[in-house]
Amino acid sequence: MSKGWEKVFYICAFITQGSSYMSPRGYGIMHRLHHAYTDTDMDPHSPSYSTNIFSMMLRTTRILSAIINGKYPVEERFKKNVVDWPAFDRFANSDITRLTWMAIYTLVYVQYATSPWLYLLLPVQWAMGAFHGAVINWFAHKFGYHNYEMKNTSTNLFAVDVLMLGEAYHNNHHKHPSSTNFGIKWHEVDPVYYAIRVFNRLGIINVPKKKLGEDPAHIISTTPLAEKAEMVKHDVIQDN
Ligand SMILES: [Zn+2]
Ligand SMILES: [Zn+2]
């Protein structure tokens, strides 16, 4: 992706996340830590190391902000080729910017709320990004089904995931972290995989053809025999 497009997506993240904006750079680094240290005490968010969803969200927020402020010890390998726009991050992460978004959301409630009870939803709206993250980082490490037996607690939360745009096939994603397609079984349709293909066709991103072909058939054809046996055992592919 060119530096120009990187900036466009930074701004898109800012507009869609508003008061709960999470730096794409910070989240990218934190997500790599999650893959490297899944379900250990070095994992930035694991239900195995938090007593409830809110304490996990708080821990995640603290670690994310320490990463952004350069106060969290991160090995160089986790920072390699991660997007970066420090000046924009400083603006978007500032208290005044977050408070401005919170005021805007509140004004929308003032204008449109049909019952005072609706204001109880305001704190959720203010922290929407953290809640969205927790849906996967908590529930897709607790409930759902497995396509793969892994040394971590990752699950596929929904058999068909429209709500989280494919993110809920989290067990598949932990097994094949660099695959552009999170779906493995026929019903696991990953909408973002098709968005990636469109972006690639438009020249916005440049995914090597080999990577883009990582649909289930490709993954299966390049999977070592021992893993294939595992997949057959778990009903991911047919034994023929
Ligand atoms: Zn995970
Ligand atoms: Zn990932």
Image: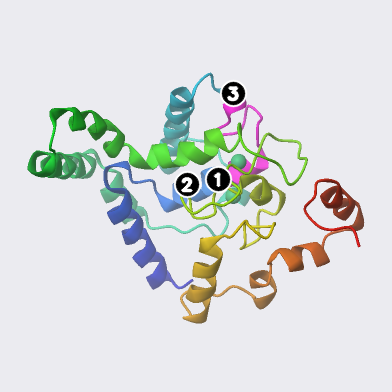
- Left or right? Give the position of 4 relative to 214: left
Question: Which amino acid, mark 3?
Answer: Tyr
Question: Which amino acid, mark 1?
Answer: His
- Left or right? Give the position of 203 relative to 233: left
Residue 39 is inside the magenta segment: yes
The residue that label 2 is drawn on is: 27
Mark 3, mark 2: which one is toward the viewer? 3
Residue 118, image x and y in percent? 20, 32
The vertical placement of 40 against 26, above or below, is above
Residue 140, image x and y in percent? 58, 38
Q: Nearer the viewer, residue 159 or 68?
A: 159
Which dot marks residue 49?
3
* Labelled pair 2, 1 in contact (Cβ < 8 Å): yes
The vertical placement of 202 against 90, above or below, is below
Residue 24, image x and y in percent? 43, 52
Q: Kindly state the secondary structure of the residue where label 1 is placed.
A: helix
Residue 71, image x and y in percent? 46, 35
User: Could you tell me how far apart the alpha carbons at marks 2 and 1 are, in whole angstroms?
Assistant: 6 Å
**Magenta residues (range):** 32-48
User: Could you tell me how far apart the alpha carbons at marks 3 and 1 are, in whole angstroms?
Assistant: 16 Å
Residue drawn where x is 82% and y is 51% of the image: 231
Q: Kindly state the secondary structure of the residue where label 2 is placed.
A: helix
Residue 197, picture quadrant: bottom right
Q: Nearer the viewer, residue 61 or 202?
A: 202
